[in-house]
Image (cartoon, rainbow, N blue to C red):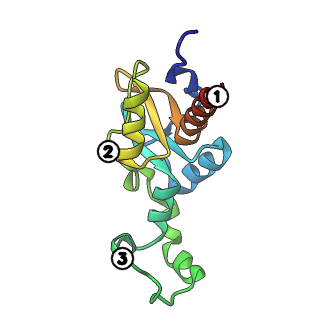
Amino acid sequence: MSPRRVVALVRRDVPVLAHDTTVDAAVRALLDSDLPALPVADARGRYAGIFGEREFIGALFPRYVQSLGYAGFVTQSMEAVLDKRRGALREPVMTYVNSEHVDVSEDVSDIALAETFLHHRVLIIPITQEGHVRGVVTRADFFTQLAGRLLDEGSG
């Protein structure tokens, strides 16, 4: 029996957001994609970062919220925050992307992929070739495969 490879987990037909896509269009694409995050490409079409749930939340809340250890003392309602930050929806998605280059090639090992998910705390890892996105692996798909492999081997 040959070992299962990560490449089998790659989702190939994923939308890639352009750097100048507005946040509202990016959120709509995210919701339509059924993925927790999407890759973003620069003006040359090369991988530039990730925009997902975390980055969207970051776009809506003032930057100081990310540095708080506790926000229970903040009495502002969600509606007040959304009213103040509604303008963020018209900003380019590139303003909020996770621009760490968290991407790998298709020949990545399972261990390297696990390390990337653990170290960078991302929900997707883009698979790139010569700087262009060829697909993504989701943390959920990776988890499902790992759990299945462990449980299958443990029950035999």
- Mark 2 or 1, which is nearer the eye? 1
- Residue 62: which quarter of the image? bottom left
User: Which amino acid is tagged 3?
Assistant: Leu
**Residue at 44% across, 81% down:** 71
* 29 or 110, nearer to the observer: 110
Q: CB of mark 3 within 8 Å of CB of mark 2?
A: no
| Among numbered discs 3 and 2, the one appearing first in the sequence | 3
Left or right of 34 in this view: 143: left
Secondary structure category for the residue under label 2? loop
Secondary structure category for the residue under label 1? helix
| Quadrant that contains the N terminus | top right
**Residue underneath mark 2:** 100
Q: Can you say whether 11 is above or below 3 in the image? A: below
Q: Position of residue 153 (x, y in %)?
A: 60, 26
Q: Position of residue 73 (x, y in %)?
A: 45, 89
Q: Is residue 1 visible?
A: yes
Q: CA distance from mark 3 to mark 2?
A: 22 Å
* 103 or 22, nearer to the observer: 103
